[in-house]
Image (tube, helix red, strand yellow):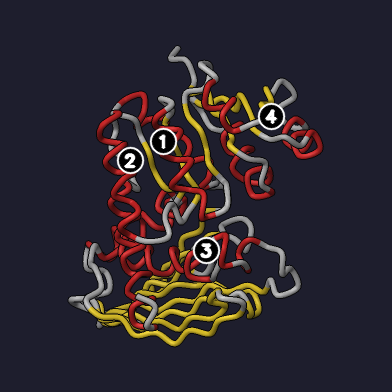
């Protein structure tokens, strides 16, 4: 049997503890081997489900560990590029939380280092690993809804009661678009394979971060509209509206957390087809796809070039807002 990829987690974030570390632990072909944190209290939450976890008291010690093959980076957004590059230089494959970079141009150094080292580096953009999104893409490409006219979506939550949250701080790369705009923007790009040609935006900011963004865009063959917010009641959906039908995803981004993954295809004659995926964990699928790419050289579903394209769209919003 092929030896599993030995993973280390670079930082004891709550998200890593609740989602990604358990996914690595559960994934086929992977072993959750180590955690880097200087806090024994934080390490305890990981050791609860992986008792033999090795704990390093610094990020540097983790990267120097010859028994670690790959690292997952869940640090604040402003540290992602720095530690992804350091991990690649240390000979580790890297799966870095989104957004990997705060500007599209910042991806270039990571892409260059990935190519120079021959290692796999990727953004942890989990939704493209979920079968609901592969199904949506296949339906669109097969012409199930005819000519696409409009893509629209919403992703919102309310964290105003947590001002210390990194998403509410400009110095840590906070804001709704870096946090969740990657999903509304990236999913439209993933399904259609198109890139925006023009963007307009209405953005509301607090303490230097966007807390509400209504973005409209022209794509070569359709119109796009989305809302992201960190100051609204929790909601999420995406819809692809064509001349002959509509594809709706009612839990597109947080499957098994916000709700059950469900896709509905509506067409003429009151024909409605609904597909559900109650048992799929896109975090586990992401780790398993990463492992197949490392071990077998399989194409990774979300290469850095795709993630760079999503950041380019976010950059277009900043330009439309007058922030360059």
- The residue at the far left in this view is 220
**Marks 3 and 1: in contact by CB < 8 Å?**
no
**Circle 2 — which element?**
loop
Instruction: Report the quarter where the C terminus lies.
Output: bottom left
Neighbour class for label 1 at 10 Å: few (<14), some, many (≥20)?
many
**In this rendering, would 116 be left or right of 69?**
left
Disc 3 to disc 4, C-alpha distance: 28 Å
Residue located 53% across and 60% down the image: 261
- The alpha-carbon separation of the residues under discs 2 and 4 comes to 31 Å
Is there CB contact under 8 Å for labels 2 and 1? Answer: yes
Q: Residue at horizontal 30%, vertical 29%?
A: 117
Residue 179: percent from the left, percent from the top? 52, 63
Q: Is residue 283 left or right of residue 267?
A: right
Among numbered discs 2 and 1, the one appearing first in the sequence: 1
Check disc 3: other Cα within 10 Å, few if <14, some if 14-19, many if 20+.
some
Q: Is residue 26 visible?
A: no
Query: Quick check: marks 3 and 2 in contact, CB under 8 Å?
Result: no
Decide which of tag 2 and tag 4 comes sooner along the chain: 4
* Residue situated in front as seen by the camera: 314 or 181: 314
The residue labelled by disc 3 is 179
- The disc, 1 or 3, on the residue closer to the chain's N-terminal end is 3
Residue 57 has which mark?
4
Q: Residue 274: x percent and y percent?
A: 46, 66
When the figure is inspected, residue 324 is found, relative to residue 310, above or below; the finding is: below
Nearest the viewer among 27 and 105 is 105
Label placed on residue 290: 1
Secondary structure beneath label 1: helix
Which residue is denoted by mark 2 in the rendering? 300
Of helix, strand and loop, which one carries label 4? loop
């Amino acid at each position: 049997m092929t030896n599993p990829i030995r993973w280390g987690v670079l930082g004891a974030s709550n998200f890593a503890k609740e989602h990604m570390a358990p996914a690595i632990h559960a994934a086929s072909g992977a072993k959750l081997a180590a955690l880097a944190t200087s806090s024994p209290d934080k390490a305890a939450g990981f050791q609860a489900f992986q008792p033999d976890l090795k704990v390093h008291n610094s990020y540097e010690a983790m990267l120097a560990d010859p028994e670690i093959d790959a690292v997952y980076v869940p640090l604040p957004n402003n540290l992602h590029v720095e530690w992804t590059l350091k991990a690649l230089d240390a000979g580790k494959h890297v799966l870095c939380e989104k957004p990997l970079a705060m500007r599209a141009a910042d991806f270039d150094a990571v892409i260059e280092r990935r190519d120079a080292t021959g290692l796999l580096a990727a953004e942890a953009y989990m939704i493209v690993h979920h079968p609901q999104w592969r199904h949506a893409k296949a339906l669109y490409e097969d012409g199930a809804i005819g000519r696409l006219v409009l893509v629209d979506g919403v992703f919102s939550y309310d964290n105003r009661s947590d001002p210390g949250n990194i998403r509410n701080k400009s110095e840590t790369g906070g804001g709704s678009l870096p946090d969740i705009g990657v999903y509304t923007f990236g999913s439209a790009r993933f399904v259609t394979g198109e890139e925006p040609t023009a963007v307009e935006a209405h953005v509301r900011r607090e303490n230097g971060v966007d807390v509400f963004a209504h973005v409209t865009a022209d794509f070569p063959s359709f119109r796009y509209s989305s809302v992201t917010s960190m100051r609204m009641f929790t909601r999420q959906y995406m819809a692809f509206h064509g001349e002959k039908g509509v594809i709706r995803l009612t839990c597109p981004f947080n499957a098994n957390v916000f709700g059950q993954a469900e896709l509905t295809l509506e067409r003429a004659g009151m024909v409605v087809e609904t597909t559900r995926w109650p048992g799929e964990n896109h975090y586990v699928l992401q780790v398993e796809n990463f492992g197949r790419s490392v071990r077998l050289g399989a194409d990774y579903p979300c290469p850095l070039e795709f993630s760079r394209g999503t950041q380019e769209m976010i950059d277009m919003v900043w330009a439309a807002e007058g922030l360059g």
